[in-house]
Image: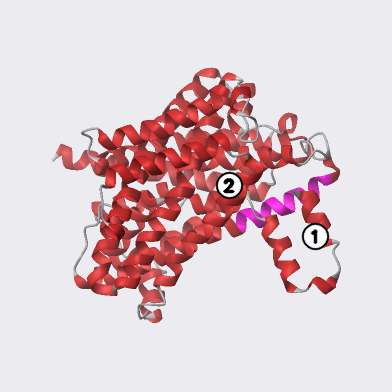
Amino acid sequence: MKQAVAEAEESPPATGAGAGTAVWWRKLGPGLITGAADDDPSGIATYSQAGAQFGFGMLWTLVFTYPLMVGIQMISARIGRVTGHGLATNIRRHYPASLLYSVVGMLLLANVINIAADLAAMGEALTLIVGGPPHLYAALFALISAMLQVFVPYAKYVRVLKWLTMGLLAYVATLFIVRIPWLDVWRLGLSLPPLPWSAAFVTTMVAVFGTTISPYLFFWQASQEVEEMRTNPLAGPLNTSTAEARSALARIKLDTYVGMGFSNLVAFCIMMTTALTLHVHGITDISSSAQAALALRPIAGEFAFLLFGMGIIGTGLLAIPVLAGSAAYAMAGTFKWPNSLETPPLSARYFYLVILIATLGGMALIFAPVDPVKALFWSAVVNGVISVPIMGVMLLLGARRDVMGELAISLRLKAVGWVCTVVMALAVAAMVLTQLVPLAK
């Protein structure tokens, strides 16, 4: 990838702005895909609920989490690119096996539940648009996603994922359909609401934090940096080949800033759209992204409804491979299996088997008598619980000279990472507390 970038940068100026845009586009990859996958149908439901229930009152969370997302994702990407291995392999090499097994086991469970929720939302969205059986659509989406991951090589498949990120622009477009009172957005959305906060407010705030900062994103971006390295025969781990370190780390920085910025911009647009439409019309209870799209129809019109619904399908097609793939990378790193989306299935059979199990397991959950809203809540709890130790381990790994060599993370990056870890720990504690207090009463 970097070789292609270099060749494009050396091309004659006569090629014009189009060539410059192409070079810039090639520099984006793992960070952009990771950020866009963060806005999956489950995340859309969370942001829709936040906007519908609290209006502009939750917009500040997306501004607050942006630097935290950038910091923690940059650390995961650097670990992958510098060491040439994913997070699970690095944890296995330097920390107790019990920590790795528990974290990866919970990650797999949470990802399967998330896949189920995303598939269900995609099936419901397509049913709203064209009619038909939602479960059948969900099953077809699962099979398409699984087959693409197994049979399409990484170099080709990653291009598909990058273009799928553009589907998120549907949510930016919805803002052009509604009138925005920018002074109210600034006054109510970008400042902390006065204390005390209600239990519902705290729960929703924690859900937004847990949606924007999720463990599967750490494993995915680190592993994608390794995949990018492998596609270039001249590249190697930066801790053994520091000549290309400067350009590689600069690309990671740009990619992560843009990817996380894109992610939070889209989340901001979703939250503001539902605040301007659903909240002001008294619709404050949204349990799924498809329900949010349906509620928009009589208020914002058919076009907004179609944009919202098609966006759910597009983001799901992007997010499901990331959820299944991150679980597969984590399992493969844990048990020393060959792992790469560029490797033929028979040469990495266990890796691809996990992708199939995660995707088809999520599909099976759709047909099970399980409340999807409750399942998604507990998935968020599990994600929040495991994100704290994973982030702590990542920060320790990133600071170790025997792991990162001269490219250990800076003091500023460490500070941002630890702030993110503490915020998530407090968020998990708040989530547990808001659930226990009503039980005690």
Which label was assigned to residue 8? 1
Residue under the image location 76 percent in, 41 percent down:
407
Residue 262 seen in render? yes
Dot label at residue 73: 2
Q: Within the image, what quadrant is residue 197 found in?
A: bottom left
Marks 1 and 2 close (CB-CB < 8 Å): no
The residues bearing labels 1 and 2 have C-alpha atoms spaced at a distance of 27 Å
Q: Quadrant of residue 135?
A: top left
Placement of 107 over or under 51, stated as above or below: above
Q: Nearer the viewer, residue 401 or 280?
A: 280
Q: Secondary structure at mark 1?
A: helix
Residue 100 rendering spot, x and y as whole percentages: 52, 24
Residue type for callout 1: Ala
Q: Earlier in the sequence, mark 1 or mark 2?
A: 1
**Magenta residues?**
244-257
- Give the mark toward the camera: 1 or 2: 1
* Magenta segment, prevailing SS (helix, strand or loop): helix
